[in-house]
Image: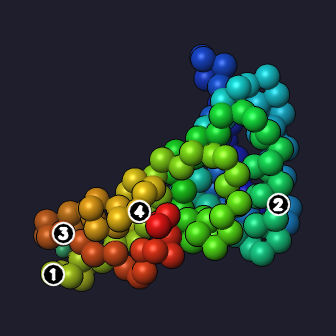
Amino acid sequence: MVKTEIRKLPDGSVFANLVGKIDEHFDGRDILKAADAARKVSLKMDGVRSISSLGVRALEAFMQALGDREVVLEEISSAMANQATMIPNLLGNATVKAARLPFLCPSCGSEGAFAVPYESGAATAHAPKCPQCGAKMEFDGFSEEYLPH
Ligand SMILES: [Zn+2]
């Protein structure tokens, strides 16, 4: 189940923060309602921890329902980034700014999720510095499964 927090911004656009699991019950109806007259919708989705297979269809339908509005995904979670590489149409025409992805420190072993630009090669070009020891962190997994390539 997804919890949504929606704000209408002074420029007439709509911002929504989605947190939780996207499953077959997700329809984004409250966002679509708030965005009725909006030309732009910004979504923060780094709190989406998983997407079920039926949730993928629900998300696809929601992105389509946003129609020709300008859709900006401020930040997506690793679960979403992973689905988006497997299903290229999933995010429709949305512009993805950043993805919050897992990194590991080769020097002290600490791990965490960090936002990197959603672009090819970002996992190395924008690898974060370890907050514990300052070493350059490494991607925890295969970055091509999460970033466009
Ligand atoms: Zn470290």
Give the percent coordinates (x, y) of residue 54.
Answer: 83, 71
Name the residue type under label 2.
Ala
Q: How is the image coloured?
A: rainbow
Could you say which quadrant of the image residue 114 lies in?
bottom left
Q: Label 1: state its secondary structure.
A: loop
Kindly tell me whether mark 1's CB lies below 8 Å from ligand 1: yes
Beta carbon of the mark 3 residue lies under 8 A of ligand 1: no
Disc 3/disc 1 C-alpha distance (Å): 9 Å
- Which one is in front, 88 or 132? 88
Q: Earlier in the sequence, mark 2 or mark 4?
A: 2
Element type at mark 2: helix
Single out the mark in the foreground, 4 or 1: 4
Q: Secondary structure at mark 4?
A: loop
Q: Quadrant of ligand 1?
A: bottom left
Q: Earlier in the sequence, mark 2 or mark 1?
A: 2
Q: Which residue is mark 1?
A: 107
**Residue 49 seen:** no
Residue bearing mark 2: 58
Q: Residues within 10 Å of mark 1 (few under 14, many from 20)?
A: some
- Residue type at tag 3: Lys
| Residue under the point 37% across and 79% down | 140
Cα separation between marks 3 and 2: 38 Å
Q: Which residue is mark 4?
A: 120
Q: Amino acid at mark 1?
A: Ser
Look at mark 3 in the image and give the residue it sits on.
136
* Residue 66, horizontal then vertical, whole percent: 78, 40
Q: In 3D space, how far apart are the residues under numbered discs 2 and 1 (Cα atoms)? A: 41 Å
